[in-house]
């Protein structure tokens, strides 16, 4: 049998993403909401919470919004391409002990396979008892695919037209860039703990849509998230200097303690959704 390497040429599609569309018979709002997930995740993050409540997908539909949920390039239902023929490297797999620290569930040395000896932060609003089940949602991810993923998100926005984007973590980083790529189409951006490096503000662009950014607990205590927060704060400050409407919500500074990295999955996610939805009502339906 010939191996794939022995074949002179072959044709494989790549760079695709998946989008699932939910259209209401009579939406209350003018624009659909695009929900973008974080790194090593898929659109299922928006469907339910780990403790079994309806997720923000349902909440937006109940609030009268059409919704489009994506699986980004290489994730979930978008599928992925062969490596090393198409992708140069094998994928990365997030481990539970890594995620325990990175998602700010508990201290780095607090993860244990024995549930009785795991140590979570207190207070902790993520349903810790469901952490292992939540880990079953995680998928492989490839480093250095920002360019093809950003291109797919930009194409999605062009295909949908006028919209608002609600995004988490790595997806929120893509959303910040998408707002600069298509400021005429994106009516508002909501970033839940954006990660990565934001784009450089464009001094000549005074038409960026309103931005809302939310941060959970213990960000300043974690070296990686402290760095992400600093870069996003600097970016938001530069946007404000250009006239963009920006609101930063620091939940612990408001006395709301215990939120993890997954704000849309924590036990107060319904209250946070209401806050996001009312902010969108105030900014996203303007002409």
Image: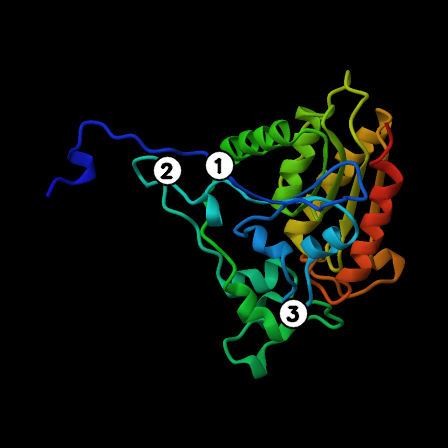
The percent position of residue 202, horizontal first and vertical second, equals 73, 21
Q: Which residue carries the number 3 mark?
A: 52
Q: Is residue 123 above or below residue 251?
A: below
Q: Residue at position x 73%, y 25% from top?
A: 183
Residue 248: mark: none
- In the image, 40 versus 250, the foreground residue is 40
Dot 1 or dot 2, earlier in sequence: 2
Q: Are discs 1 and 2 less than 8 Å apart at CB?
A: yes
Badge 3: residue crowd in 10 Å (few <14, some 14–19, many ≥20): few
Q: Residue at position x 84%, y 52% from top?
A: 275
Q: Residue at position x 69%, y 35% from top?
A: 176
Dot 3 or dot 2, earlier in sequence: 3
**Would you identify the image quadrant in which residue 109 lies?**
bottom right
Quadrant of image for the N terminus: top left
Q: Is residue 81 left or right of residue 118?
A: left
The percent position of residue 118, horizontal first and vertical second, equals 59, 77
Task: Please tell me whether mark 3 or mark 2 is closer to you in this view.
Answer: 3
**Would you identify the image quadrant in which residue 164 lies?**
top right
The percent position of residue 120, horizontal first and vertical second, equals 66, 72
Dot 1 or dot 3, earlier in sequence: 3
Measured in 3D between alpha carbons, the distance from the residue under mark 3 to the one under mark 2, in whole angstroms, is 36 Å
Q: Residue at position x 72%, y 30% from top?
A: 162
Measured in 3D between alpha carbons, the distance from the residue under mark 1 to the one under mark 3, in whole angstroms, is 32 Å
- In the image, 265 versus 198, the foreground residue is 265
Q: Which residue carries the number 2 mark?
A: 87
The secondary structure type at the circle numbered 2 is loop
Q: Which residue carries the number 1 mark?
A: 145
- In the image, 228 versus 16, the foreground residue is 16
């Amino acid at each position: 049998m010939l191996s794939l390497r022995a074949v002179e040429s072959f044709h494989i599609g790549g760079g695709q993403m998946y989008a699932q569309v939910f259209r209401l018979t009579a939406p209350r709002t003018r624009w659909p909401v695009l929900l973008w997930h974080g790194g090593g995740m898929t659109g299922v993050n928006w469907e339910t919470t780990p403790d079994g409540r309806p997720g923000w997908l349902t909440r937006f539909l109940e609030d009268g919004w059409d919704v489009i949920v994506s699986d980004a390039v290489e994730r979930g239902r978008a599928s992925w391409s062969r490596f090393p023929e198409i992708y140069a490297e094998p994928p990365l797999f997030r481990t539970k002990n890594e995620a325990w620290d990175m998602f700010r569930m508990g201290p780095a040395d607090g993860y244990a396979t024995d549930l009785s000896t795991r140590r979570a932060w207190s207070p902790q609003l993520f349903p810790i008892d469901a952490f292992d089940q939540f880990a079953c949602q995680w998928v492989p991810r490839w480093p250095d695919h920002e360019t093809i993923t950003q291109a797919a998100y930009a194409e999605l926005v062009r295909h949908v037209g006028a919209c608002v984007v609600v995004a988490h973590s790595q997806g929120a980083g893509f959303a910040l860039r998408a707002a600069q790529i298509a400021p005429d189409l994106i009516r508002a951006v909501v970033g839940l703990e954006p990660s990565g490096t934001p784009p450089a503000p464009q001094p000549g662009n005074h038409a960026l849509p309103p931005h809302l950014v939310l941060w959970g607990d213990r960000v300043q205590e974690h070296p990686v998230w402290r760095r992400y927060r600093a870069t996003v704060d600097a970016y938001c400050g530069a946007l404000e200097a250009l006239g963009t409407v920006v609101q930063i919500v620091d939940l612990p500074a408001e006395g709301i303690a215990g939120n993890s990295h997954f704000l849309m999955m924590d036990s107060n996610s319904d209250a946070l959704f209401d806050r996001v939805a009312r902010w969108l009502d105030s900014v996203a339906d303007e002409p």
